[in-house]
Amino acid sequence: MEEKKSNSRFWQIFSTLLILFGIISFTSQKFSFEWYYTWGAAAVTTVIVLLVFRRLSR
C-alpha cells in the first residue's frame, strides 16, 4: 500500500512540475528572458512544489 501511495505522489509532483515548467517556458519565450532567469525560476518552482507536497503528506 505504501509503494502505491508513493508512486501516486511521484506522479502528482511530476505532472505539477511539468505543467509549471511549461508555463515558465512559455513565459520566458514570450518575454525573451535570459536562460539563467528561466532555469532559476524552474529551480525555485521545483523547491516550492516539493516543500508543498512534503507539508501536505504529513
Image: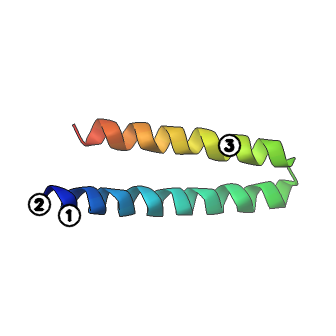
The crowd level at tag 3 (other Cα within 10 Å; few <14, some 14-19, many 20+) is some
User: Which percent across, then down, holds residue 32?
Assistant: 88, 54
Q: How is the image coloured?
A: rainbow
Label 1 and label 2: CA atoms lie apart by: 5 Å
**Point 37% across, 63% down: residue:** 11
In the image: residue 3, left or right of residue 43 = left
Depth check, mark 1 against mark 3: the one in front is 1
**Point 35% across, 44% down: residue:** 53
Dot 1 and dot 2 residues touching (CB under 8 Å): yes
Q: Amino acid at mark 2?
A: Met
Q: Amino acid at mark 3?
A: Ala
- Circle 3 is placed at which residue position? 41
Q: Secondary structure at mark 1?
A: helix
- Circle 2 is placed at which residue position? 1
Q: Secondary structure at mark 2?
A: loop
**Point 73% across, 62% down: residue:** 26
In the image: residue 40, left or right of residue 33 = left
Q: Is residue 55 above or below residue 9?
A: above
- Circle 1 is placed at which residue position? 4
User: Which percent across, then down, holds residue 39?
Assistant: 73, 46
| Dot placed on the residue nearer the N-terminal end, 2 or 3 | 2
User: Which percent across, then down, holds residue 2?
Assistant: 15, 55
